[in-house]
Image: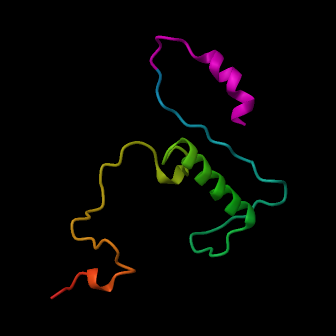
Amino acid sequence: MLRAIREEVDALYVPGTRYRKTGIVFFGLEKPGTARKTDLFDTTPPAEQSRLYAAVDALNARFGKGKVFSAAQGIGAKSWHMKRQKLSRRPTTRWDELMTVR
């Protein structure tokens, strides 16, 4: 899709003009009859969904982490971050690094 609109987008650029970052939403990219409503607890994603995630991962690997993401993740700066001061470095692989609660 980007290849198809590249020339038009390049023609919109005007040197010296201030621009803002924006996003583009694509709907209806699934093949007819293949759309499937899923829920949070769906443990068997269809092949098309797996291919979508692989494509998103490939784009992020090529253009940088977080360049392509789900709109459900929200946009803009996060006002909070998880506290990690007491997080063990390898909690699932190194039992000796787990915290001990007394």
Q: Horizontally, is 61 left or right of 27 in the view?
A: left
In the drawing, does residue 64 fall left or right of residue 32?
A: left
For the point 30% across and 49% down, the residue is: 79
Q: Nearer the viewer, residue 80 or 94?
A: 94
Q: Main secondary structure of the magenta part?
A: helix
Quadrant location, the C terminus: bottom left
Residue 40 location, quadrant: bottom right
Span shown in magenta:
1-18
Give the farthest residue toward the left: 102
Q: Is residue 2 magenta?
A: yes
Left or right: residue 40 versus residue 19 is right
| Of residues 98 and 26, the one drawn nearer to the viewer in this rendering | 98
Q: Which quarter of the rendered picture does the N terminus lie within?
A: top right
Instruction: Judge by depth and name the residue closer to the eye, 39 or 62.
Output: 62
Above or below, comparing residue 102 to residue 78 in the picture = below
Residue 92 located within the stretch drawn in magenta: no
- Picture quadrant of residue 89: bottom left
Residue 34's x, y, as percent? 80, 60
User: Residue 44: horizontal and vertical position, in percent?
Assistant: 67, 74
Q: Which residue does the image show at 70% across and 59% down from the upper left?
A: 51
Residue drawn 68% across the image and 26% down it: 6
- Relative to 37, say whether 1 is above or below: above
Across and down, in percent, residue 84 comes to 26, 64
